[in-house]
Amino acid sequence: FNTWDLTESFERASPHYRLSVLAAQYAELLRGSPWTGYTSLEALYELATPLTYELGDDQEVWQFVSLLSRASQIRSWNQ
């Protein structure tokens, strides 16, 4: 592992890495973890949406983004 292996920003990281991070953060939000900080479902959705273009053939990505969208809508209805 070298420092030059690090990416300058989350958006420049590989699509599969970003998907893994977003799925983990989503799980933390669902369980009410204090480690999520100020992360919102809307923010996760915005970060996940470009993955549908980058990983377009992967139906699980489409399902995940759709799930984030629905969860965000449900949460906004309950507030």
Image (spheres, grey):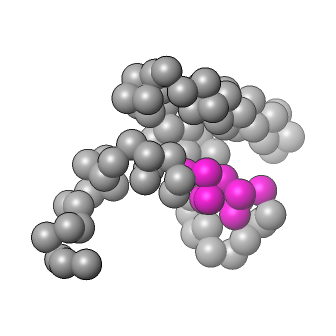
- Against 56, is 60 above or below? below
- Against 74, is 10 above or below? below
Residue 3 place in picture, x, y as percent: 17, 77
Q: Is residue 25 left or right of residue 78?
A: left
Residue ranking furthest to the right = 78
Residue 20 place in picture, x, y as percent: 53, 53
Q: Is residue 32 left or right of residue 56?
A: right
Residue at x-position 33% and y-position 48%: 14
Residue at x-position 46% and y-position 22%: 56
Viewer-proximal residue among 68 and 53: 53
Residue 71: quadrant of the picture:
top right
Viewer-proximal residue among 28 and 43: 28
Residue 26 place in picture, x, y as percent: 66, 53
- Number of numbered tags placed on the structure image: 0
- Against 72, is 20 above or below? below
In this view of the protein, can residue 40 be seen by the observer? no
Q: Is residue 26 left or right of residue 49?
A: right
Quarter holding the N terminus is: bottom left
User: Is residue 25 within the magenta segment?
Assistant: yes
Quarter holding the C terminus is: top right
Residue 16 place in picture, x, y as percent: 44, 46
The magenta region covers 22-30
In this view of the protein, can residue 12 be seen by the observer? yes
Question: Could you tell me what secondary structure mostly forms the magenta stretch?
Answer: helix
Residue 68: quadrant of the picture:
top right
Residue ranking furthest to the left = 4
Residue at x-position 61% and y-position 59%: 25
